[in-house]
Image: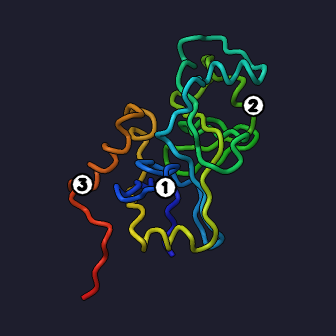
């Protein structure tokens, strides 16, 4: 099995699950025990990082840098937060997932968001998407997802509303010309 860690899952147009429709999921972990990822293109309406920090008693020092949206990372454990960010000295609970992407799950990173000590690029999510052993592989066989290697530009630079379309363009063909049907010869 090839690991999809540091890859993006791109929902096929035919994926009708309302939770994952037109979603782009960053895969943080993928091994024989299962997979874990964060949806990177579903902002939580009416919840900015600044508002989240205030609710958690970590008010921001800089109003401009934390007005970005908090994302709905997935349907599992939505009270748990995750921060994808550019590599930086590790926090209490950080992992380097790709050459230019880290994941931190500890609260200590929240204390620096909005300050000069914050990572240059970051994305805050609540919740995650998870697959049991073999489940994601079966969904790939069923043509629910396409995959590409993740880039920091897709995670941090592309506007949220354009991430699904931009990710599909990197595949080199028009996603709307695909079918969910598979054939065997």
Give the number of the disc on residue 17: 1
Q: Do the residues labelled 1 and 3 touch (CB within 8 Å)?
A: no
Q: Mark 3 sits on what residue?
A: 176
Horizontal and vertical percent position of residue 13: 34, 55
Q: Badge 1: how crowded within 10 Å, few (<14), some, or many (20+)?
A: few
- 3 or 124: nearer the viewer: 124
Give the number of the disc on residue 108: 2
Q: Compared to 119, does 145 lie above or below?
A: below
Q: Compared to 107, does 137 lie above or below?
A: below
- Residue at horizontal 62 percent and vertical 44 percent from the top: 103
- 104 or 37: nearer the viewer: 37
SS at mark 2 in the image? helix
State the image quarter where residue 52 is shown: top right
Please tell me whether mark 1 or mark 3 is closer to you in this view.
Answer: 1
Q: Earlier in the sequence, mark 1 or mark 3?
A: 1
The extreme bottom residue here reads 185
Residue 81 is left or right of residue 15, and the answer is right
User: Between marks 2 and 1, how big is the CA–CA gap?
Assistant: 35 Å
- Residue at horizontal 34 percent and vertical 47 percent from the top: 167
SS at mark 3 in the image? helix
């Amino acid at each position: 099995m090839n690991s999809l860690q540091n890859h993006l899952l791109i929902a096929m147009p035919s994926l009708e699950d309302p939770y994952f429709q037109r979603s782009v999921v960053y895969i943080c972990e993928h091994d024989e025990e299962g997979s874990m990822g964060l949806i990177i293109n579903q902002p939580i309406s009416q919840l900015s990082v600044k508002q989240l920090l205030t609710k958690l008693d970590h008010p921001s020092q800089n109003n401009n840098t934390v007005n970005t949206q908090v994302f709905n990372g997935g349907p599992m454990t939505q009270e748990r937060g995750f921060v994808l960010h550019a590599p930086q000295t590790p926090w209490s609970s950080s992992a380097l997932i790709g050459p230019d992407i880290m994941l931190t799950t500890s609260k200590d990173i929240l204390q620096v968001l909005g300050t000069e000590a914050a990572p240059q690029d970051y994305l805050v999510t609540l919740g995650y998407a998870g697959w049991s052993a073999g489940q994601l592989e079966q969904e790939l066989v069923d043509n629910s997802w396409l995959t590409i290697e993740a880039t920091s530009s897709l995670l941090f630079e592309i506007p949220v509303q354009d991430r699904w379309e931009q990710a599909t363009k990197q595949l080199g063909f028009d996603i709307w010309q695909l079918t969910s049907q598979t054939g065997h010869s």
